[in-house]
Image (cartoon, rainbow, N blue to C red):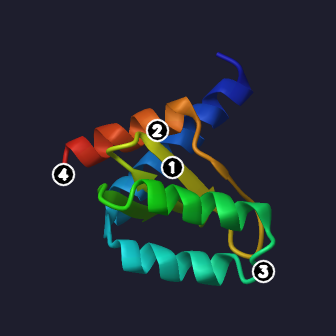
Amino acid sequence: MHYDDDTMNNSMDFRRESVRKTIQPVTLAELKEIGEKQFPIVTDPWCGRYFDFLAKHSADNFYQATSSEGARIIYCRDAGQGVWFLPGGGMGIMQPNGLQVLKEIVDAL
């Protein structure tokens, strides 16, 4: 095993444990409030994507969690999709491995 492989596995283990400990249901109203804080400029392309996603899945079940690095994770179990936000900046769409971890954690609740 290479050093990088071990580091990657440990990082994923820490993330998984952090998410498992912090995951909780979140309401649509709470998600809208999160979006308003995360996207204070409505012309931000992520703003439109975020709120369009909420509107499209307004009847679905959502969860939020925090990773070991401090990223906020929003996960829609029904759609099998999620996003992450870093404090003060970056964000992205959850990738298949992360979505699988989230699905397993939520299914175990």
Three-letter code, disc 3: Ile
Q: Quadrant of the N terminus?
A: top right
Labels 4 & 2 near each other (Cβ < 8 A): no
Three-letter code, disc 4: Leu
From the viewer's side, name the closer residue of 13 and 90: 90
Number of numbered discs overlaid on the protein picture? 4
Mark 1 against mark 2, which lies toward the viewer?
A: 1
**How far separated are the C-alphas under marks 3 and 2?**
28 Å
The answer to which image quadrant residue 85 occupies is bottom right
Which callout, 1 or 2, points at the residue further toward the start of the chain? Answer: 1
Q: Which residue corresponds to the image point at 53% horizontal and 30% vertical from the top-left?
A: 96
**How far separated are the C-alphas under marks 3 and 4?**
35 Å
Residue hosting label 2: 99
**How far separated are the C-alphas under marks 1 and 2?**
7 Å
**In the image, residue 7 lies at what x, y percent?**
65, 36
Mark 4 against mark 1, which lies toward the viewer?
A: 1
**How far separated are the C-alphas under marks 4 and 1?**
18 Å
Circle number at residue 82: 1
Which callout, 4 or 1, points at the residue further toward the start of the chain? Answer: 1
Q: Callout 2: few (<14), some (14-19), or many (20+) C-alpha neighbours within 10 Å?
A: some
Which callout, 1 or 3, points at the residue further toward the start of the chain? Answer: 3
Circle number at residue 41: 3
Q: Which residue corresponds to the image point at 56% horizontal and 59% vertical from the top-left?
A: 52
Vertical placement of residue 58 versus 43, above or below? above
**How far separated are the C-alphas under marks 4 and 2?**
16 Å
Circle number at residue 109: 4
Where disc 4 sits, the SS reads loop
Labels 1 & 2 near each other (Cβ < 8 A): yes
From the viewer's side, name the closer residue of 98 and 4: 98
Mark 1 against mark 3, which lies toward the viewer?
A: 3
Where disc 3 sits, the SS reads loop
